Image (tube, rainbow, N blue to C red):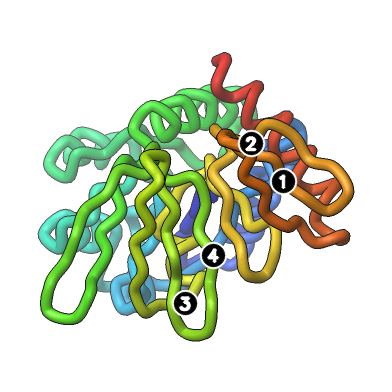
Amino acid sequence: MIRFAICDDEPYMLEELSNRLTDYMKKRQISSYQITCYLDGQSLLESDLNFDLLFLDIQMAKPDGMEVARRLRRLGNQCLLIFVTVLKEYVFRAFEVEAYDYLVKPLAERPFQKTMKRALLSLRQHAKQNLLIQRGNSCQVILLSQILYCEVLGRKIYVHQTDGTVLDYYDRLEHLEQQTDGRFFRCHRSYLVNLDYVRGCQKGQVFLPKDIQIPVSRLRERALSEALLQHMKERNI
């Protein structure tokens, strides 16, 4: 899932950017995304900061956009940062906070689409690679590429890996889903599958290598097929 955040103190800009993002993603048949809007920098900084791409207005009441960006970087947040501003001279200060790009108000469609195309390609190329699992006082890092699927039983998640090993730990599947990237799909309330390894879907079952089968809920079968087709297209970019 791609997580977008928009921070602007003008409600109409939040709505405009949100609508542009929605239209852009729909036209490209990308359904796995989320948009969260913030009316000021402080509320953004007090959020979980779990986003991949941030559209940030520079001119806001304190903390303004530049200060918000500095704090984000100090906190270790490395999201793609796109400034939205009416004053081009502010853009030169963007290098201080490793901004990815900037858009000038009022927004023009062509620059927006050009920036989005580059940003999505960059996100795909720098997709999350690892999953950090905490088990009591210890932790373990595993590659997302080594995960076949995950299932939840009771209060535990069982991570099934390509080498046949299974790692279990206490967590919610919703939280694990947020830590993964677009290659993972929630095919059932209790299952999260890596689309890289899906070989097909039929009669309520998802087929994986080594004759492994996991369930897909009836209401998610069509969405799974669409997600798989989109995933295959994106891998060919």
Tags 3 and 4 in contact by the CB under 8 Å rule?
no
Secondary structure at badge 2 equals loop
The mark nearer the N terminus, 3 or 2, is 3
Where is residue 161 drawn, in percent x and y?
40, 47
Q: Residues within 10 Å of mark 4 (few under 14, many from 20)?
A: some
N-term mark: 3 or 4:
4
- Secondary structure type for disc 1: strand
Q: Which residue is mark 3?
A: 172
Q: In this image, 208 relative to 130: left or right?
A: right
Q: CA distance from mark 1 to mark 3?
A: 22 Å
Question: Residue 109: x, y in percent?
Answer: 64, 30
Q: Which residue is mark 2?
A: 198
Residue at image position (64%, 38%) is 211
Q: How far from the left and from the top, in percent, is residue 182?
A: 53, 43
Q: Looking at the picture, which amino acid does disc 2 mark? A: Val
* First in residue order: circle 1 vs circle 3: 3
Q: Quadrant of the C terminus?
A: top right
Density class for disc 2 (Cα within 10 Å; few <14, some 14-19, many ≥20) is some
Q: Which residue is mark 1?
A: 206
37 or 4: which is nearer to us? 4
Q: Comparing marks 3 and 2, which lies closer to the viewer? A: 2
Q: CA distance from mark 3 to mark 4?
A: 10 Å
- Asked whether residue 231 is in view, the answer is yes
